[in-house]
Image: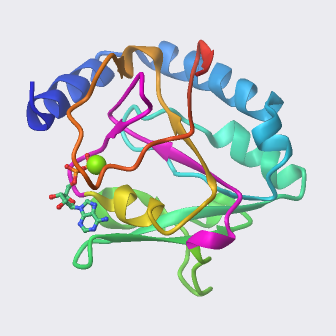
Amino acid sequence: MDKKELRKKFKDLRESLSEKEWFEYSKSICQKLIDSSFFKNSQRIAFYYPVNKEVNLTIAIEEALKQGKEIFLPKTHLKEKRLSFHKVTDLARLSPGVFGIFEPPSIDSPIEACELDLILVPGLAFDLKKYRLGYGGGFYDRFLKETKALKIGIAFSFQIIEKLPQDPWDEKMDYILTEEGFF
Ligand code: ADP
Ligand code: MG
């Protein structure tokens, strides 16, 4: 299957997840993340805010804020096909942006990609070599090539496939985290 067909397949798979499974698996992923040395050793963390049935990391965001870490969420710039990450201190202050995705207020200038310690990357699917299938805009590929931060792909275990088609611009993750753990 090519990337386009795989995107359709994994979107459908994700939509078939029940609300209860979505919530329980997300909770388990948050706990594994919070207990990890990657989380403990990171002060500046880029999260994402979930759309549709993406893994919900809200519990981990709240925990990071409680521990005094700095957290950043993406804004999507559609015309330039790029992301910028802005500091967030309160999830109640987000508002809907492009595609209805909740975004941080843009009063502050964005953090430079090289200043982040850890980036949690959403995706439609990941493979065993830790390559990622996104929504088809290449937004994360463009952002990730600017950073040396640790990159962890976040997904449910049914989003893991043995091998994805790989293009020269596709960025590789350092680890993948699912409800079954890290690999
Ligand atoms: P996704 O990563 O969202 O699954 P693709 O990997 O298929 O999507 O990339 C989508 C488009 O983005 C490609 O046509 C590619 O040309 C473009 N692209 C990806 N990364 C870069 C980059 N670093 N610089 C310029 N264009 C890029
Ligand atoms: Mg890509």
Who is closer to the viewer here, 55 or 7?
Answer: 7
Quarter of the image that includes the N terminus = top left
The residue at the point 63 percent across, 57 percent down is: 149
Who is closer to the viewer here, 112 or 104?
Answer: 112
- Residues drawn in magenta: 113-137
The residue at the point 17 percent across, 23 percent down is: 9
The residue at the point 58 percent across, 87 percent down is: 107
Residue 47 image position (x, y, % from top left): 59, 52
- Outermost residue on the right side: it is 67
Q: Inspect the magenta stretch and tell me whether residue 89 lies in it.
A: no
Above or below 158: residue 77: below
Quarter of the image that includes the C terminus = top right
- Outermost residue on the front side: it is 168
Residue 149 located left or right of residue 55? right
**Count of number-bearing discs:** 0
Residue 102 image position (x, y, % from top left): 46, 59
Who is closer to the viewer here, 97 or 38?
Answer: 38
